[in-house]
Image (cartoon, grey):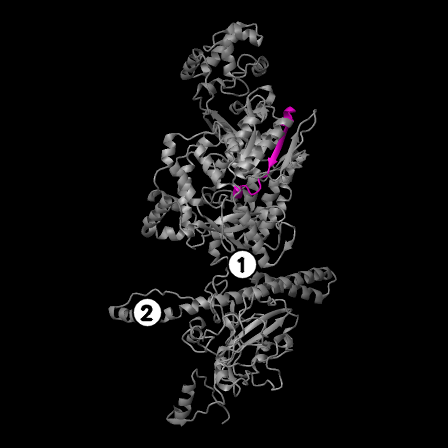
Amino acid sequence: MNSAIVVFLNDVDKVRKLTQNGIVVNNEMILVSPLSSPAKKVMLSNVPPFISDEAIGKELSRYGRLVSPIKKIPLGCKSPLVKHLVSFRRMVFMVFKEGVGELNVVFKFTVEGFDYNIFVSSDTDIKCFKCGQTGHLARACPERQSDPGVSERPGQDAAEPAGVVPPAAAVRSAAEGPGAAAAPDLTESEPQAQPAAQTPTGATSAPEKPRTAEPAAAEPRSARPDRKKPWSTEKSSVGSGAVLEPPALTEAGAEVQGNRMETPDTTPVQGDGGDVDMVDEPVFKVQNKRKKQGKGQGKKQARKDTKVEERDSDSDDCISDSVLTFDSQEEQYTLNVTRDIVRSLKALEIEIVELQRLEATGDRGHIEALKSKKAKMNDLLDITAQGALVRSRFKSAAEMDAPSKFFFSLEQKNGQKRFIHAVRTESGDLLSESTEIRKQTVSFYSKLYSSEWSGAQVVEDSFLVGLPKLSERAARELDRELSLEELHEALQRMENGRASGIDGLPAEFYKAFWAVIGQDVLDVLRDSIQRGELPLSCRRAVLTLLPKKGDLTHLKNWRPVSLLCTDYKLLSKALASRLTKVMERLIHQDQTYCVPDRSIFDNVYLIRDILDVSRLLGLKTGLIFLDQEKAFDRVEHEYLWKVLETFGFNPGFVAMIRVLYCEIESVLKVNGGLCAPFRVYRGIRQGCSLSGMLYSLAIEPLLSKLRSFLSGFNIPHANASVYLSAYADDLVVMINTQEDVNVLAAILNDFQILSSAKVNWTKSEAILVGEWGGGQPTLPGGLAWKRGGFKYLGVYLGTNEFLNKNWEGSVEHVKGRLSRWKRLVPKMSYRGRTLVINNLAASSLWHKLACVDPPPNLLANIQAQLVDFFWDGLHWIPQSVLHLPKEEGGQGLVQLSSRAAAFRLQFIQRLLTGPRDLVWRAAASGLLHTVKGLGLDRALFLMDTKMLDISGLPMFYRGLFKIWNVFKKQNKGCRSVHWLLEEPLVYGGRLDISGVTVPALSRTLVSSGIVTLRELVNVAGSDLSRAEDLAARMGLRSRRVVNQLLHRWRSALTSEERVQLMDYQHTETGPAEDKSFPRLNIAPDLDGCAGPPPGVPERRGDGL
């Protein structure tokens, strides 16, 4: 016979039957001859992509002959972007050598100092590592339960073998005796217990012990010496061969049986963990949807599904155990591959830089080499990009077009920032071991959350006096019983995709099943409030640490945030909805944190304007920025309950809040692992909806006492004083004398005794403004005065030199953010590019742009970068079209100059129509009073500001009026007597009649001190009839001209306004200041603009 056909069968019985019966072809019997050994399928798992098939084949050939190529198994992704990816598994068919019935070994490849374990198996069924039988796992093995002498964790004193016998081989060795070899080509002279470190290359085998062998004595985990890390191996190359390590000795316990690579311990030990069996890949139980069928088919399918479910339920233990081992192997392999890629990228970068230098020589070899290196780098970058897409649950490019949480999370790299590499002890020692870091972290926070409450009655009485109190009606409203509607409303306000608490149930679960579990949740919370204690899952929070500025080896520079269970957050959010309604009545306007209608910008505006007023008017003042050490975490619970009682909260509402802090615990999450829980006796949980408001209430007694005993900063022309500015624990105090400093230090010391609050003087700052002829005040805590400015709430404030620091590197920062997305731009739609620009690049400018003006041309330079990124270098339509809304043919691309103008208009709107007790309005009025000697503040915006000389104002206000001048204003009249009397008579105001009778009337009125209607009424009477008095005041001789002026002013007033003036004459006291600023309609002033105006010409501007 010159040729033959080889038929592969997956069952030995089928081969035997086929050789006995033969095959009938064309009525002719053809005999079938079996090969010497049947071919078996061999699976290779955990195979890195850079280990070649040739190297693997060389090792496999020790056990038999390969009769098929080694095939890579696809990963099975459905997405076209990652469909081409292959898994870490390969498959090959082999004919084993005589004496090799099964193959169940581990190949250890050492590449550039890193070990990679490849698991090789010809078994198709998962077997017990205890007895080698199928149908159960090692933790449920009958022999384990009946053999008390077998140790689960053997001691490390016994010498570790070079390899460990696979489960199937262990069973076989019991029958064949201890001398059976795993590989047929090993010599008898090799030592049977030779360690792997002494094995040069090739394969080794460990002696197989019978199951009746006496196990090694178990030692406690802490007594065992540390194993060598799997990545701390000696350097070798793939060409040097591979080292065989079969999975486990049968009596070696969980760690050795599963051949788990030992990694740094970052998770808490929860019991002994049981035995873990290793499989090639994780198994997931998927419930298939049943299609519509006929009645008969439906019953058959139902019976079939029942059988499948029974079989799946038997394998649930296998699923839970196998996932644990797979995760540990995946962690090690990912770590090694990532290091290899990073090392390769760095090497390629060096080579590319060198080749680019040599490219100028024109050598063809250098040019080709450069192209090759760049191609390799692109391949590696594609691998890293694909990994990022997988880790971010990327599904398709269509998701790039939606402003989803997934889209913006692609920019975040919080995982790397949260890793603690080392910590310092109180003595200054540096700890870098994982276990030591966890112990030190737990010790630090256990001490931090330990109570120091002393309850000094004298100090308590000095702070808890003079505070505002709730009305009885408001207190009763807060005290009502919790309702289902409140909880449902709180649930609907919760964001999806947020981290869940220790029970793992997110808000999405409660939203999906609220109709089923809503009443039960309400009953549990009501019962908990009645008993005064929540369930353990609610009381226990996962504490994750976020880095702050400073040396991160000091744990005090990490901010703890509590991950709380959703049912806990439901209760706190419902109570927060009640509390927020009364916060404005209890908290002074200079504290803006978690108070409705107050903003962080209010604090920045106040400090900025105080610094400008001091320099502009030559006033002296000192600003001390106090850094509170662990402010939220040091609030004593007993102190907090007393503060709530002092504010007038009923005991019922206080009890609802107390239940959130009764018997609470925290579990620290350090470098991805959870530590042992510890009790929390003080501190406000950051992550709770109530935390911000509770802290504002807790610190208000301190702020109230400072306002009472400090002299403060007096603002000229505003009849107001500013004592402090507070945003949560970010506190700035104004001082004028040494006595102020002494009072401040004494109050802070007393408050520390009362509440355990502590000032960190090393991080505090002090700024001195103006000339101090009598000498500078002496500061406590070693604090020293500075000049110029400082950074406050993310913005540099002070002199122009400090203001310019806000914009240093802004262009490079935006360019760097855009460069991260450069590789994805060709795959993104225009909508996706707009989202990247508007929400990720340009948004980094908004906070500072709302507070200070940028240097000239800065926004134009950044805008050019944004447009260039949008077009990817090719500009197809005019830039102005891009800024139009999408429904008008544009893309909605942000225009930075327009956004800056919008911020200025928002500032003007808040200045004119904001709350009456707006904290920075007095300082802004002090600056506006300096404009051209008019002595006006907000009334300036009722004039034609183009006619004003604003050159003496700070840069921010000059830019403010520049934007205001772009609009045309129409005054719709006054609603109150106060603003009627504040109507300007000059420079384009509604009552400006200059140019009619007397030339230069505005200049004459200003020099006469008659600028507003109030000043005119004081001279000419409420009926505007005393012409002689007005003529004398203005220095005019002609009574006829003065009568004409008065007549025109009366004509400019409406009949209702004239009645208001007559009523004003008969009142003994003047009208109270009204916050109802006159209504203004504004619209862009398009006079002189080229081209057709945008939009509908008849459209009116929005009112202020």
Residue 1003 vs residue 920, the one in the foreground: 920
Q: Which mark is residue 1086?
A: none
Which of labels 2 and 1 is toward the front? 2
At 52% from the left edge and 57% from the top edge, which residue is drawn? 673
| x and y percentages locating residue 320 in the rendered image | 44, 66
Q: What residue is pinned by disc 2?
A: 305
Q: Residues within 10 Å of mark 1 (few under 14, many from 20)?
A: few
| Disc 2 element | helix
Residue 607 visible? The answer is: no
Q: Where on the picture, by quarter, is residue 372?
A: bottom right
User: Residue 729: horizontal and vertical position, in percent?
Assistant: 54, 38
- Residue 99, position in %: x, y? 52, 87
Q: Which stretch did the figure color magenta?
A: 614-634
Spatial CA distance of label 2 from label 1 is: 38 Å
Residue 946 image point, x, y percent: 57, 25
Identify the residue at horizontal 59%, vertical 79% (top origin): 193
Q: Residue furthest right?
A: 361
Mark 2 crowd level (few <14, some 14–19, many ≥20, 10 Å Cα) = some
Residue 462 visible (yes or no) = yes
Q: Nearer the viewer, residue 231 or 1048?
A: 231
Residue annotated with mark 1:
388
Instruction: Please state which of residues 279 and 986 is positioned toward the viewer in this rendering.
Output: 279
Q: Amino acid at mark 2?
A: Asp
The tag earlier along the polypeptide, 2 or 1, is 2
Please, what is the three-letter code of the amino acid marked with disc 1? Ala
